[in-house]
Image (cartoon, rainbow, N blue to C red):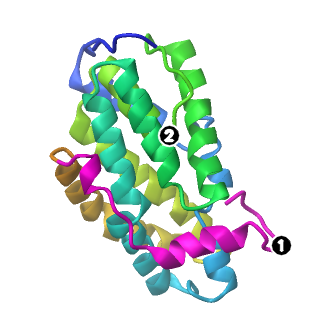
Amino acid sequence: MGMVERIPMPTDTAALLTLAQWLSPSYPVGAFSYSHGLEWAVECGDVSDAPSFQGWLTDILTHGSGQSDTILLATAYGASDAATIAEIDATARALAPSQERLMETSLQGTAFSSLTSDIWPAPLSDLCYPVAIGAAARMLGLPLGETLAMYLHAFAGNLTSAAIRLVPLGQTEGQAALAAVAPLCETLATTAQTQTLDDIGSCCFAADIASMKHETQYSRLFRS
């Protein structure tokens, strides 16, 4: 991947449809197989019903990977050369608090980079997931704000799907929790557009520990 150029999309609708495809559960990056430590949080009783799941999800978005990933995505989007993107990617890997969380972001990023490069004129090397999406969105001239918001919502949607299976939650309870955090996704997406890597910080220690505990959890449905 050399100089990062932008290829404008023909219409706003086309751009949104591309984002919808990239961030759909049908896009084969394997997102469905990761719970981001939620499986352990359910096992130990930290998440046991709809209110506790919504609180857990809100904290992850606001103080954990949600916020960090949006900043990584936004800075990758603003990078104009491959060397800068590589530096951002190295930061993303260093921020992973556990082996499983590193696997989660790196394997999804590799899958996204490979598939997207085959379909669109967006030559990507192996990058962590948010970095790959930011770089690809810049190349195709997709709007940053919408990319960030839809990335966060897809992340929250995947965790909601995991919670529906693990807690378990009813479909209505799960979708209500997802709807409740949608405005938060929009707010975080707006804020990330003016932030830098210096603004990254996580204080979701219970979620980080859950991702470490999950590595040795006896019975598991998810890879993280």
Task: Name above or below for residue 206 compared with residue 224.
Answer: below
**Which element type, helix, strand or loop, lies under badge 2?**
helix
Residue in the image at 52% along x and 79% along y: 206
Q: Is residue 196 magenta?
A: yes
What's the amino acid at mark 2?
Tyr
User: Outermost residue toward the right?
Assistant: 218
Q: Residue at x 53, y 16 (%)?
A: 117
Q: Is residue 87 visible?
A: yes
Q: Write the start and end of the magenta stretch as one range.
A: 195-224
Q: Residue 24, percent across and down? A: 50, 41
Residue 219's disc is 1
Tell me the quarter of the picture where residue 36 sits: bottom right
Residue 147 showing in the rendered view: no
As helix, strand or loop, the secondary structure at mark 1 comes to loop
Classify mark 1: residues with Cα within 10 Å, few (<14), some (14-19) or many (20+): few
Callout 1, which amino acid? Answer: Ser
Where does residue 38 sit, x and y in percent of width and height?
60, 71
Q: Which sits in the foreground, 20 or 204? A: 204
